[in-house]
């Protein structure tokens, strides 16, 4: 009998090894939602010349603008991040340097002569924590987005539907930890202003001359996940962007969401509310340093982003209440084909 209990303890220790801790980190929706918003905020800055047309942030460049021809984009992010709480723990989380290189491939096209745009995306993300190796995880995400586009107004009401599958893996994509399928239904709304905060008359491309932009994103989500539980959520994301000069711009987005999880094996239902303000300051490397716009485009129109965020998650499950600060310096490049 003692051998049996000894073997059982060994088995539990193996299951709770770093790989299992990574599975727990990968499977926590609050952490995932916060990180997804930070990535989208980087891709939504007004200085982004080659942004994918698929973003959480309503002030992302050209997100509501009509598209004449199909477009391919490729974006690369190289973030160096200070993370105050790598495990999203209620207390005694590990402060650490985080490296999260992210590659994003996008394709968008108008849908025949209809006021609709179809956007497809594929994203690969590698999260590495210097002092919290158990939280390391690799992610592969896809998106399919169908959005209404007003052909004469890039500040118009833009409803959309998104399907986004994602798979989480142990480092180097060794073993799959979890898979999820998100279905989002919502809308974007954007308002553009000049330097004196006067509203710019809506046109096909009023965002090109805007200095200030205000945006609102609202959507509902159903998340199916293996392993369980599945969940439902409502997101509200107000955003603001400001073009300071040709080289400098700033943006602020605040992600607020409520998430309701299906009951677990004991019949308990987890309920979360999360708020995450994200501030981003961007320096766009001047074209003059490359000689010509064509040369700058060959190098991916590089930019240097400085981003800070604060995540606060409230939950009726006591151990899922947490706070997390991040501060990052990000090398950003993007190409359009």
Image (cartoon, grey):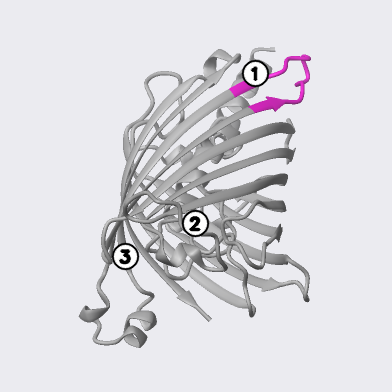
Report the mark closest to the observer, 1 or 3: 3
Find residue 6 and report its image quarter. top right
State the residue position of label 2.
60
Relative horizontal placement of residue 36, taking residue 145 as reference (left or right):
left
> CA–CA distance between discs 2 and 3?
16 Å
Q: Secondary structure at mark 3?
A: strand
Frontmost of labels 2 and 3 is 2
Q: Residue at x 55, y 13 (%)?
A: 318
Residue 270 highlighted magenta (yes or no): yes
Mark 2 vs mark 1, CA separation in Å: 60 Å
User: Compared with residue 11, is residue 252 higher up or lower down, i.e. above or below?
Assistant: below
Number of numbered discs overlaid on the protein picture: 3
Residue stretch in magenta? 259-272
Task: Check disc 2: other Cα within 10 Å, few if <14, some if 14-19, many if 20+.
Answer: many
- Which residue is denoted by mark 1 in the rendering? 3
**Circle 3 residue:** 303
Residue 316 sits above or below residue 126 on the image: above
- Circles 2 and 3, Cβ within 8 Å, touching? The answer is no
Tell me, for residue 71, which label it has, or none.
none
Q: Nearer the viewer, residue 89 or 4?
A: 89
The picture places residue 211, in percent across and down from the top left corner, at 36, 57
């Amino acid at each position: 009998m003692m051998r049996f209990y000894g073997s059982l303890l060994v088995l539990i220790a193996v299951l709770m090894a770093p790989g299992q801790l990574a599975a727990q980190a990968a499977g926590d929706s609050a952490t995932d939602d916060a990180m997804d918003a930070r990535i989208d905020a980087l891709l939504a800055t007004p200085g982004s010349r080659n942004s994918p047309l698929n973003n959480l942030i309503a002030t992302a460049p050209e997100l509501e603008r009509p598209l004449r021809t199909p477009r391919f984009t490729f974006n690369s992010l190289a973030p160096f991040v200070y993370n105050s709480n790598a495990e999203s723990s209620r207390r005694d989380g590990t402060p650490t340097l985080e490296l999260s290189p992210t590659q994003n491939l996008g394709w968008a096209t108008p849908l025949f002569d209809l006021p609709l745009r179809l956007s497809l995306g594929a994203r690969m993300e590698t999260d590495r924590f210097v002092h919290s190796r158990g939280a390391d995880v690799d992610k592969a995400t896809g998106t399919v987005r169908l959005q209404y586009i007003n052909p004469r107004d890039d500040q118009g009401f833009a409803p959309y539907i998104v399907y986004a599958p994602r798979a989480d893996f142990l480092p180097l994509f060794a073993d799959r930890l979890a898979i999820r399928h998100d279905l989002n239904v919502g809308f974007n709304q954007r308002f553009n202003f000049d330097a004196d905060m006067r509203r710019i008359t809506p046109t096909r491309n009023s965002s090109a001359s805007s200095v200030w932009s205000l945006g609102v994103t609202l959507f509902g989500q159903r998340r199916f996940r293996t392993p369980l539980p599945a969940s439902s959520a409502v997101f509200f994301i107000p955003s603001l962007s400001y073009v300071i000069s040709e080289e400098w711009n700033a943006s602020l987005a605040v992600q607020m969401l409520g998430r309701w999880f299906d009951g677990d094996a004991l019949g308990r239902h987890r309920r979360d509310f999360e708020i995450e303000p994200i501030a981003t300051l961007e320096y766009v490397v001047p074209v003059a340093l490359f000689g010509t716009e064509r040369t700058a485009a060959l190098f991916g129109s590089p930019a240097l982003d400085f981003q800070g965020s604060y995540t606060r998650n409230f939950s009726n499950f006591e151990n899922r209440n947490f706070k997390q600060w991040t501060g990052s310096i990000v090398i950003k490049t993007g190409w359009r084909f």
